[in-house]
């Protein structure tokens, strides 16, 4: 078990709607824009449902699905991510394109789950990806947000968003490594949701997360792009 304490004073608390849809004129902010109104509405509804549980502790199982044969008409691989809150019917699925890797999908599942979690929550995330856990832990070790450090990380956009979101919402995040396909009913449910996320996104592009991270922060003034796509990979290796 790896316990990652993300509580820190001085960060503004903002509601999930602010996180999902950007509002200008705020001092410390980043844009994690989910352009799909379908996904926006689902995430906001899940936040409301979690709030109604009246608990400061949530247990969420996450997973990703990578099928290299799942391609759209533009020959883009459509990957899936999903999660479910233990002992509830609160679950979520979505898809994403570009830079296929199982770790990327696990991180997307964790990020979308944290978007819905109420503030000041003790959130227990269960994932079968040790690399996802290690990547988040490594991002927390970075001293300051410096572009040259971030650009050395794969999935640095997702990782930064996860860590920053934890600070903003004062989430105490605890990550557990679980063994995949081990008979855990909730892990199996997350696995099925991730596969469903890929299938649904292949049928309906509105279920694809269009990830755009804009940091309104002097320490992070730009994100490299190539052909209109943010490069969420180690920059040096990407251009090599």
Image: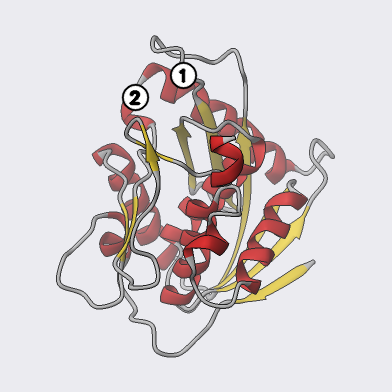
Q: Residues within 10 Å of mark 2 (few under 14, many from 20)?
A: some
Whether residue 89 sits left or right of residue 240 in the image: it is left
In the rendered view, would you say 74 is above or below 121?
above
Would you name the residue on which mark 2 appears? 205
Q: Which mark is residue 18?
A: none
Residue at 54% across, 40% down: 82
The residue at the far bottom in this view is 9
Residue at 24% across, 40% down: 37
The quadrant in which residue 203 appears is top left
In-front residue for pair 112/232: 232
Image coordinates of residue 222 in percent, x first then y, are: 35, 56
Image coordinates of residue 121 in percent, x first then y, are: 52, 74
The residue at the far left in this view is 25
Whether residue 11 sits left or right of residue 188 in the image: it is left
The residue at the far front in this view is 240
Image coordinates of residue 45 in percent, x first then y, are: 33, 52
In-front residue for pair 10/88: 10
Image coordinates of residue 172 in percent, x first then y, are: 58, 76
Whether residue 62 sits left or right of residue 182 in the image: it is left
Q: Are marks 1 and 2 in contact (CB under 8 Å)?
A: no
The quarter in which the C terminus is drawn is top right
In-front residue for pair 119/105: 105
The quarter in which the N terminus is drawn is bottom right
In the rendered view, would you say 228 is above or below 25?
above
Label 1, label 2: how many angstroms apart (C-alpha)? 12 Å
SS category of the residue bearing label 2: helix
Q: Nearer the viewer, mark 1 or mark 2?
A: 1
Would you name the residue on which mark 1 appears? 76
């Amino acid at each position: 078990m790896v316990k990652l304490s993300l509580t820190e004073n001085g960060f503004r608390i903002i509601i999930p709607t602010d996180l999902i849809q950007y509002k200008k004129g705020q001092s410390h902010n980043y844009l994690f824009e989910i352009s799909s109104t379908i996904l926006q509405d689902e995430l906001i509804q899940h936040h409301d449902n979690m709030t109604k549980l009246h608990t400061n502790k949530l247990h969420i199982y996450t997973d990703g699905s990578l099928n290299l044969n799942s391609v759209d008409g533009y020959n883009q691989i459509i990957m899936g991510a999903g999660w479910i809150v233990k002992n509830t019917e609160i679950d979520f699925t979505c898809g994403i394109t570009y830079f296929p890797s199982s770790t990327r999908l696990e991180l997307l599942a964790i990020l979308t789950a944290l978007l819905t979690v109420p503030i000041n929550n003790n959130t227990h995330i269960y994932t079968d990806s040790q690399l996802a856990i290690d990547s988040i832990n490594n991002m927390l070790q970075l001293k300051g947000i410096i572009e040259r450090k971030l650009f050395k990380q794969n999935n640095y956009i997702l990782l930064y968003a996860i860590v920053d979101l934890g600070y903003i919402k004062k989430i105490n995040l605890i990550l557990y490594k679980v063994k995949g396909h081990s008979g855990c009913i909730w892990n199996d449910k997350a696995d099925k949701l991730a596969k469903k996320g890929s299938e649904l996104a292949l049928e309906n592009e509105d279920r694809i997360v269009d990830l755009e991270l804009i940091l309104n922060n002097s320490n992070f003034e730009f994100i490299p792009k190539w052909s209109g796509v943010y490069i969420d990979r180690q920059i040096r290796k990407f251009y090599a």
